Image (cartoon, rainbow, N blue to C red):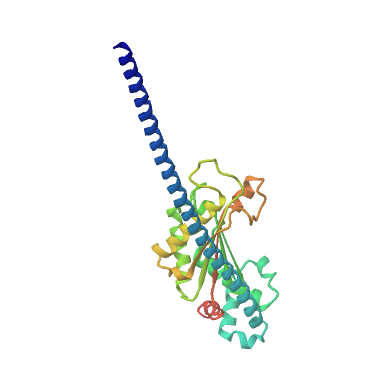
Amino acid sequence: MKKILLFAGVGLLLSLSSCVSKKKYVALEDRYETSQNELYKRNAENEEYKSKLDQIQSQVDNYYAKINALKDDNARKFDVENGTVISNKIRENMRETLKNVDPSELANAKSLKDSMDLAISYKLRQTLGEDDDIDISVDRTVVEITISDKLLFKSSSYRVNPESNDLLERIAEVAKSEPAMEVLVEGHTDSRSFVEGSYIEDNWDLSTRRAAAVVRILQDKFGVDGKQLIASGRSSYIPVADNETKEGQQKNRRTRIIILPNLDKFLAMLENA
């Protein structure tokens, strides 16, 4: 009788052991399937993300090609005899505008093109406001507005400072004045790296998010047509200063807005001066 009970006990233990192992196997199998499904999902998301990046890069490449083509085309137009390029009214308004330009800048104007670039740059400064954190340059009607990081964002953040809304609204008005204008917003960072596990992955991520944040405000808050806007993250690869110093890092953290107006619109800014 004791032997029978012993055998029964051993059989029960083996049966229980078999059940536990089977449960563990099923659980592991479920975890494996879940992991596989998650992996497939991530791969699909990565493919979609890569496709979007490729589309954005293609759009940015086309935009830079347009910049070069526009500069070349307008350079040829500027080379035409003065009387056939600008009216006497524009010429007189330009002279009046240039009286207000810094003499040291004016001394570098060697041609009609240089003088017109200076005049338009001055008028844009009057429109956007004089600020050490804003740099405006014009080259053959291509307008470049560079805004310091501290004016738009807090450190390592892509949330736009509400205090910069007034500036962005004025930029939006410039863009909306001509629906054919295209506006490229570039985000630039310094070369410092991020702490592992941070919600910002790297400088590519930060620069792209910042550019997109500015574009969204121009579109959603101030009514610029989304078809006019392009957002581009440039990371830390186009520095304007030494990244080894704090001063250099501060200069490299910037947002660059490039506006492509046509020549007629460019001249109209002087016509109405």
Q: Position of residue 77 (x, y in %)?
A: 63, 83
At which x and y percent is residue 257? 54, 63
User: Looking at the rendering, which quadrant does residue 93 occupy?
Assistant: bottom right
Compared to residue 46, the image places residue 193 above or below, namely above
Q: Residue furthest bottom?
A: 84
Q: Using the image, determine if residue 95 lies above or below residue 61.
A: below
Q: Residue at coordinates 65% horizontally, 48% vertically from top-left?
A: 243
Whether residue 243 is visible here, answered yes or no, is yes
Residue for point 48% across, 45% down: 199
Residue 119 visible in the snapshot: no
Give the side of residue 244 with respect to residue 231, left or right: right
Image quarter of the N terminus = top left
> In the rendered image, which quarter is residue 223 located in?
bottom left
Q: Nearer the viewer, residue 150 or 200?
A: 200
Residue drawn at x 46%, y 51% as measured from the top left = 40
Q: Residue furthest top?
A: 2
Total numbered circles: 0
Residue 253: image location, x then y, percent: 57, 52
